[in-house]
Image (tube, grey):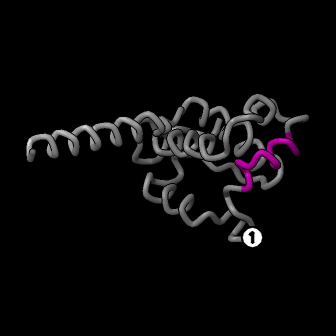
Amino acid sequence: MKSRFAWTVAVAVLGATAMSAATAYEADWKRGRIYYRQVCTSCHNTEMKKPVSPSDRTKAEWGAYLQADKHLKGKEPVTRYFSKQYRDGIKASNAAAAKFADVPEKELLEDVKAFLNKGAKDGDSPASCS
């Protein structure tokens, strides 16, 4: 009886683990690089006249910035720039926004996070904004 209970619990745990692994999203840093360079960098260069390179900050600094979700000195949330509404608004003039128009916001944000972590000052491949 104890053996059967232990077996049932083990199967349940394995099933739950498999389900969570199957639903976990693996970020695509290459897609994040495209979006960052064509949307974020483009805007910073033209509107702000202040380019922001991934290698300007460490992984921890990028993580804190994204976690705080404050852009333009707290005037707007960072997540706004990953929203479908934002992408719809700029897709006529921005190829990346058009290309990724149907990508879920959370996935696109995770993709950019992966690129920023890879390209950060202390990342695997510090990246410029070009």
The quarter of the picture where residue 70 lies is: bottom right
The quarter of the picture where residue 20 lies is: top left
Residue 45 seen anywhere in this rendered image of the structure: no
| Residue furthest right in the image | 92
Task: Identify the image quadrant of the C terminus.
Answer: top right
Nearest the viewer among 39 and 121 is 39
Task: Identify the image quadrant of the N terminus.
Answer: top left
Which residue is located at x 85 percent, y 36 percent?
Answer: 91
Residue 127 seen anywhere in this rendered image of the structure: yes
- The residue identified by callout 1 is 75
Question: Residue 51: image x %, image y %?
Answer: 69, 49
Q: Amino acid at mark 1?
A: Lys
> Is 81 on the left or on the right of 91, as rendered?
left
Question: Residue 2: image x %, image y %?
Answer: 8, 47
Question: Residue 25: image x %, image y %?
Answer: 50, 38
> Is disc 1 placed on a helix, strand or loop?
loop
Residue 83 lies in magenta, yes or no?
Answer: yes
Nearest the viewer among 92 and 49 is 92
Which residue is located at x 60 percent, y 41 percent?
Answer: 107
Which residue is located at x 74 percent, y 34 percent?
Answer: 102
Which residue is located at x 61 percent, y 46 percent?
Answer: 106
Question: Residue 21: image x %, image y %?
Answer: 39, 37
Q: Which residues are magenta?
A: 80-90
Nearest the viewer among 22 and 88 is 22
Mark 1 nearby-residue class (10 Å; few <14, some 14–19, many ≥20): few
| Up/down of 11 relative to 86, above or below | above
| Residue furthest front in the image | 1
> Is 68 on the left or on the right of 21, as rendered?
right
Residue 98 lies in magenta, yes or no?
Answer: no
| Predominant secondary structure, magenta span | helix
